[in-house]
Image (cartoon, grey):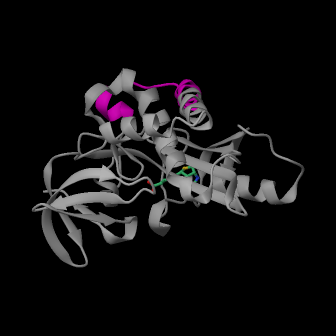
Amino acid sequence: MSLKEVDSTNTFLKNILSNSKPVPDGTVIMAETQYAGRGQRDNTWHAEPGKNLTFSLLLKPGFLSAQQQFDLTRAVSLGVYDALYPLLRDSLKIKWPNDIYYGDKKLGGMLIENILQGSQIKNAIIGIGLNVNQENFPDNAANATSIKKILQRDYELKNILAEICNHIEAYYLHLKAGRFEYVRNIYLSRLYWLNEQRQFKSNGQVFEGVIKNVEDNGLLVIDQNGGEQAYNLKEIEFLNK
Ligand code: BTN
């Protein structure tokens, strides 16, 4: 379904899930404009109307437990990655946990909202924002880039959407078949700053460390002088020079 304007495609999907008849697995809600787009960590997500992809995909991963939520994050991140790889090649990275980066700039992000039933994931609302044809970004989004800024041409949003959905489906099927290790290994290999000596901040302290791994549950493992420590999203900040 394609909407002209909506507050947030994630919120819209959540509302129709709780209000109406069953919503089929694989439903996609796409919006030309979101006036209250939501990002990670309670941020807002801004995108120039009509120029970017802002959509939500509904999956019903009843085979995944709440403890396996990060495997879904991996599958979705890799689906976006694989869809863009033919265009953007090796500068494309996944910044833990699920930002899509080109070089040191953010091309897109996702907000996955899982609805649990008992210990299983009943519904996953997978919201994806990807900067495609937008050329100018506000000063407070100085770190943002778009496919157009990188490749100097416009892309058809619907085509990129279809590629993303196809590739997410492929990884989703790997999970469904129990190939978690396969997906985990590829995810790790695509990570921004993997095995590089970099600066981070945690608890007000700046330190140098090396990303070594992502635990099954999604914690980021950083090696600091031979000692490894695992962090969650709220505990760690990447410091770009
Ligand atoms: C991030 O902070 O990086 C995540 C951004 C997620 C934005 C997308 S746009 C479509 C969907 N609807 C929302 O309100 N947010 C997500």
Give the residue furthest to the bottom. 204
What residue is drawn where x is 60% and y is 48%?
A: 126
Q: Nearer the viewer, residue 51 or 203?
A: 203
* Quadrant position of the C terminus in the picture: bottom left
Write down the region rendered in magenta: 147-165
Residue 152 visible in the displayed image:
no
What residue is drawn where x is 23% and y is 59%?
A: 222
Is residue 153 located in the magenta-colored stretch of the structure? Answer: yes
User: Viewed as shown, does residue 93 lie left or right of 198?
Assistant: right
Is residue 114 located in the magenta-colored stretch of the structure? Answer: no
What residue is drawn where x is 15% and y is 47%?
A: 196
Image position of 202 with respect to 107: above or below: below
Q: Nearer the viewer, residue 165 or 210?
A: 210
Q: Magenta stretch: dominant SS?
A: helix
- Residue 100's quadrant in the figure? top left
- Residue 91 lies, in percent from the top left, at 25, 33
- Residue 216 lies, in percent from the top left, at 43, 52
Image position of 57 with respect to 19: above or below: above
User: Viewed as shown, does residue 182 lie left or right of 166?
Assistant: left
Q: Nearer the viewer, residue 20 or 190?
A: 190
What residue is drawn where x is 30% and y is 43%?
A: 191
* Quadrant position of the N terminus in the picture: top right
- Residue 211 lies, in percent from the top left, at 23, 52
User: Viewed as shown, does residue 178 lie left or right of 187?
Assistant: right
Image position of 159 with respect to 221: above or below: above
- Residue 26 lies, in percent from the top left, at 71, 37
Residue 42 visible in the displayed image:
yes
Q: How many marks?
A: 0
